[in-house]
Amino acid sequence: MRQPLLVSGGVVLLLITAAAQTRHPAAAANRASLRTPWGDPDLQGVWNYAAGTPLERPAAFADREFLTDEEFARAEHDIEARGNADRREAVGIGDLRLEHNDFWFDKRKTILSRRTSLIIDPPDGKLPPLTPDAAKQTPVGADEYRTAEGPEARSLNERCIIRDGNGPPILALPPPVNVQLNGHMWQFQILQTAKQVAILSEYIQQVRIIPLDGRPHLPPAVRQWLGDSRGRWEQRTLVVETSNFSAQRLFLGLSAANLRIVERFTRTAADTLDYQFTADDPTRWTKPWTAAVPIGKTDGLLYEFACHEGNYGMRNILSTARALENRR
């Protein structure tokens, strides 16, 4: 059931603040230059981040950073075809993933970037080599390949706790899938006060509260699903550093316990956010890497995603597993 989203507690104050900032139509023509009443760059609005670009550069593009006009047109055509939920040529798990027809998807018509990969550093568009210890680990697979020993064996997304792609970092590629089809527009809203920035995600309703007052990070022993974020302004850019992730939080299939994410938000146009993040985990990669995720403006509202209330899938998965065990 989707209903207009109501947020309680401290975020209500943020919503009231945002609603009070009514702008003259002439000023809206160049929102990138606008600032809040207290002087910070204005990042507020509802945004989406369905990128349509692979995380790593496909071998076909070698060392090329951008698509040609012809390749870009073909990529948009192919993504539309693969993202058509009315198709029925898939079998098995692939067919189960088409449980909603195309009518229910709010789609963007274009890919937001001509880049051949979201990764911009290293320059080859590939993830850095793994450390020897990380190379010995087996990444956790997609939900359909997980065990059903109990609810803890299923993903946080499937359990309606968090969705990894909501951030940090904001990345529309649920592991191990490497290309985001042009389907869902994963929406989130940025709300600001002089002392905090809130990022509210529509899907599963995650809320990140990012202090801007220079307070230190939490002690290393305090671990959270979304990590511990601290923000600061560098001219027009909001820089957010996040650490202290729960060891049970996964990023690209492995534990995020030692992960540090640095995000950079810059409003470059009325309908565009330049969003980049750097991922650093010396226990996993031989060096940090950086990705640029295109983010576009959405004209609309966030709606309630009542995940827990309608999550019959978890009960069905576990009860089916127990029934199969009893048949052996």
Image (cartoon, rainbow, N blue to C red):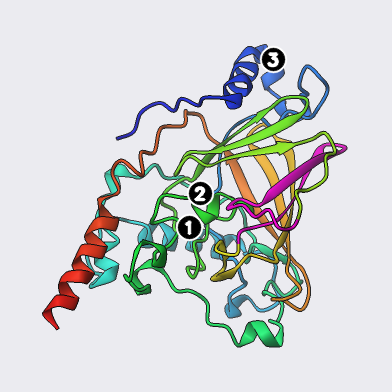
Task: Please name the amino acid that badge 2 sits on.
Answer: Thr
As drawn, 259 above or below 200: below
| Residue at the image position 23 percent from the left and 72 percent from the top | 91
Is 159 left, or right, of 195 in this rendering? Answer: left
Residue extending furthest toward the left = 327
- At numbered mark 1, what does the secondary structure look like: helix, strand or loop? helix
Asked if disc 2 and disc 1 are in contact, CB closer than 8 Å, the reply is: yes
Instruction: Evaluate whether residue 238 shows in this view.
Output: no
Circle 2 residue:
110
Circle 3 residue:
26
**In which quadrant of the rendered view does residue 104 lie?**
top left
Q: Nearer the viewer, residue 308 or 89?
A: 308
Is 239 left, or right, of 207 in this rendering? Answer: right
Mark 1 crowd level (few <14, some 14–19, many ≥20, 10 Å Cα)? some
Task: Please name the amino acid that badge 1 sits on.
Answer: Glu
Mark 3 crowd level (few <14, some 14–19, many ≥20, 10 Å Cα)? few
Distance, label 2 to label 3, CA atoms, is: 27 Å
- At numbered mark 3, what does the secondary structure look like: helix, strand or loop? helix
Asked if the magenta segment contains residue 244, the reply would be: yes
x, y percentage for residue 157? Answer: 44, 55
x, y percentage for residue 28? Answer: 67, 20
Task: Please name the amino acid that badge 3 sits on.
Answer: Ala
x, y percentage for residue 139? Answer: 52, 77
Q: Nearer the viewer, residue 306 or 292?
A: 306
Instruction: Point out the tag, 2 or 1, that comes first from the N-terminus.
Output: 1
Magenta range: 220-246
Instruction: Evaluate whether residue 18 shows in this view.
Output: yes
Mark 2 crowd level (few <14, some 14–19, many ≥20, 10 Å Cα)? some
Circle 1 residue:
76
Instruction: Point out the tag, 1 or 3, that comes first from the N-terminus.
Output: 3
**In which quadrant of the rendered view does residue 285 lie?**
bottom right
